Image (tube, coloured by chain):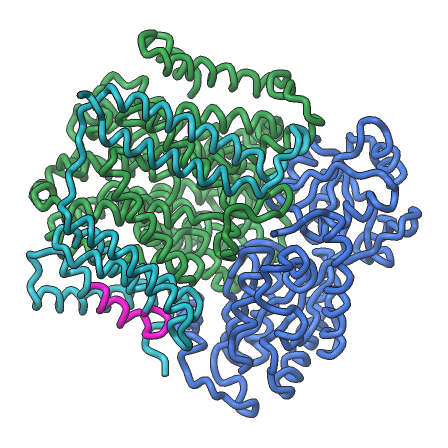
Amino acid sequence: MDLIQNLGHGFGVAFTLNNLLFCFIGCIIGTAIGVLPGIGPVATISLLLPITFGQPATTAIIMLAGIYYGAQYGGSTTAILLNLPGEVSSVVTTLEGYKMARNGRAGAALTVAACGSFFAGSVATILVAASGPLLTQVALSFGPADYFSLMFLGLIISAVLAQGSVAKSIAMVALGVSLGMVGTDVQTGQQRFTFGIPELSDGVGFVSIAMGMFGIAEIIINLERPESRSVMSGKVGSLMMTRAEVRRSIPSVLRGTAVGSMLGILPGGGAALSSFASYMMERKLSSHRHEFGSGAIEGVAGPESANNAASQTSFIPLLTLGIPGNAVMALMVGALIIQGIQPGPRMVEAQPDLFWGLIASMWVGNLMLLVINLPLVGMWVKLLAVPYRYMYPSIMIFCAIGVYSLQNNVFDVYQTVVFGIFGYLCSKLRLEGAPMLIGFVLGPMMEEHLRRAMLLSRGDWGVFIERPISATLLAIAAIALAAMLLPNIRKSKDAALQEGG
Amino acid sequence: MTWKLGRRWLLAAAVPAVAAARGASAQSWPAQNIRLVVPFAPGGTTDIVARLLGAGLQERLGVSVVVENRAGAGATVGSETVARAAPDGYTLVVSNIASHGISPHVYRNRMRYDAVTDFTHIALVVTNPTVWVANPNSGIRTLADAVARARSAQGLDVATSGAGSSNHLMVVRMGQLIGKELNHIPFRGAGPAMQAVIAGQVPMMSDSLPSASSHIRQGSVVAVAMASAQRHSAFPDVPTFREQGYDLASDSWFGLSAPAGLPAPIVERLNRETRAFLSTEAVRARFAELGGTPGDMTAADYAEFVKQEVAKWAPLVQASGASAD
Amino acid sequence: MKLNAKDLISAGLLMSFAAVALWLNLDHTLGSARRMGPGYMPMLAFWILMGLGGITLVLGLFNGPDPIETWTPSEVWFLIGGAAAGTVAGLAAARMPGFASVGWNPLGIGLFVGCMVASIVPSWRPLFLVSGAFTLFGIVLEPLGLMVAISISVILSSFADKTHTPLGVAGLVVFLCVLCWAVFIYELDIRVPVWPQF
């Protein structure tokens, strides 16, 4: 069979000593930058790009890919241990993961994140190899109207992230959307709400908001309540997952993998939606849904699997169309072009070593990450035993350096302080940060697609119900909204959200 | 081992350019690492070529050239930091059509530098023609087809990499030439725009040749017209706008600049090394493949060129309605 | 009474945010449905925010009681004093020649002074000493380098917790300087000044 033969060829490429070495280096660097707050794969890859000049193209891309998914693995660590989400996908992980850590189950949370990610990564790799070109058609069939409806559905169901009042959490989504309006208008190039500050012309920084509202605000609250943090450092708990936890995680990992693989194919936003779509699903489908909000393992297993699956399948548009789906993929294209290779539909035939070698190395990389991360779990968990008076200045310094390094600009540091104070205020008023961040990320994308759809349809709103994909998504959103506003019809709400995933 | 070599490179780069003595004289230049600011996010065409240039200069000058991406506000954020730096030859910027041609008009009242007087312009690095491409199934093969579509009741949608880009201004100009406004569909970057064209959601796109070249070669889009004075050597089959009866010829470009007041010997040396790098066979071949034309101008010519560009874009920016105010 | 104080304050906060934003949005053209202007989507978002704030307000009248912690008079006064002092310091710094008015330094100095004034009250210290230390890091990082920035912001933030000992703080400073140099400078090579520049 062709696929087996090609994969065999790919493994032949991936298992050369040099490629294995660079895959390993990439995974290590990726894990490190994932763990460090603020410093993301984009900055790191652009710093390391010159190193790859001297390497063959295949080796270079294998290493860069290793950094990319290594960062996805590492990102969950700080989210679980310190309530510090480095990117959109780990915002969701903080919700249950940090609660688990406070309950003394940090080891289990980290273990399930690593194992779930490995499983999801393996499945998604096979998917990329077996049906990459076919799945490209899925990505191409999504027009602006469909993207808009997808984002809209995402915003509606993000109210499910609420731990408390639904009205307040939808209001926080709207606040996030409003904050997302700051910056240059994509359609006209006009500056909105920037007050003449050039640093705001590309919008308020996601990392600044996340670090401020989660990281800094959490430090302040812990310092105000010495009794709660002593409880935390006292309870390290067993590292291993219990049998019950394993049993509970398996269906979540499977569902997360499916959701993540599908959404990852959609460039621009798909991957961001995947982890919280999975969280929402778990919250509605899990047989332990009453435990959500107090540290349910399903809320870590599902989203972590989903975001890793999505990061693998997000290679599909790059490999089959030559079109980068996000900033990291754009850098990969850059690395390839510097090597004299034009990515695109012919890459499979023209560069079989590169194509199949990369796919095989994705799997090898995932295996390496599992091997790197599982032994580290014990070490990470021991960090929790460090007295909090030593922990909080360290977290603060790492956040500050990370935020500064985003743009080499102190403005981002001050912006983080402001969001830290705002985050503290929100927690006093029981306003939640997670829905706000989701709104902040999805809002601008939704606006962009809405306006583009209207430009293309010549102002006809009908386009949103004429296109089958869009109509389906909107119908689900409508049912979800109705179910949320009428809490009595609980049964149909569950059914609606089941379809929504 | 290569990793070691990489590590050494990193170590060499770890000493920030500003940390050492600031009063380096023109005779001893270069004595420390050079910071090359790219005012765009990593991964774009400009970033890629700037990195190639950085690597070339590093080899020729014998000191590390560290590329630093400082994106934002139509490439003005990164350019502004360089305009304010010391003119010691250790801080350079990739000046380009956005930061030193179009943005001065878009950000009129908010500009904190003058594109001409606040910089020492050193050398032109590359010019890229703009090319209009169409989806193969859109029925558009020539400019005449496109104009007919634009004049029909349906109108013509044209995608670009963003509002206020040179690609967008070409769409505005074409609309002026045919007396019918085109339906401009801006995207966030060339990648998503190209995907929409390939998927058939938008029939046409105005794009710079390097980002479109692989898609043209692979046949996923059809090149309709090239907006340059002559046909491009790498795509001899693609006619120009002028050949098809529309006077539209404009290239995007970028070059190397430094803060105003850079000593003449350093300008001279950088200009010489840049041109020498650009004229090597390997670089020419690589640029030809991408669809760019390497520059070959004296520093004085490049300064004059920038001046003309700033003047040239003012009326089109006004017509496009792009404004940051 | 069933007033929910937290919800009522939240609603006030959200609605005043929406009101200010709607007012700012008057600058932007709304456009038509076909060609939406830059003000169209913000208008939708802000009105929805306003509406949800209103719903929160109405709900807050009935689903209480949920009182907030009451502030002592000194807490209130030093908070107001901090805000005023910070604003004055920031504006003054912007008018001063040299370092104080360069780049974002006025903003940093204003934030820092505001945090310091408010943190005179012990119960505000966790909030404003941590924020102040974070700000201080930003102010000194570029002129004095990473090592100095780490040292002084760790020392400042250590006053936020009573259990610190001088020796422990000194050890922490040394440890963090070494760790950050190894991780950020040696390994990741981020662009940041490490030592003071003269």
Question: Observer-nearest residue: C165 or A371?
Answer: C165
Could you say where residue C182 lies in the image, as x and y percent from the top left? 28, 66
The answer, for residue A308, to whether it is visible in the render is no
Q: Is residue C54 magenta?
A: no
Q: Can you tell which chain is drawn cyan?
A: C
Q: From the viewer's perspective, tell me whether residue B144 is left or right of residue A458.
A: right
* Part of the protein shown in magenta: C140-154
In the image, is residue A106 above or below residue B306?
above
The answer, for residue A287, to whether it is visible in the render is yes
In the image, is residue C181 above or below residue A296?
below
What colour do you see for chain B?
Answer: blue
Could you say where residue C42 lies in the image, as x and y percent from the top left? 52, 36
Q: Residue at x 38, y 61 (%)?
A: C107
Q: Residue at x 29, y 35 (%)?
A: A115
Q: From the viewer's perspective, tell me whether residue C176 is left or right of residue B9.
A: left
Q: From the viewer's perspective, tell me whether residue C128 is left or right of residue B151.
A: left
Q: From the viewer's perspective, tell me whether residue A377 is left or right of residue A499.
A: left
Quadrant occupied by the N terminus of chain B: bottom left
What colour do you see for chain A?
Answer: green
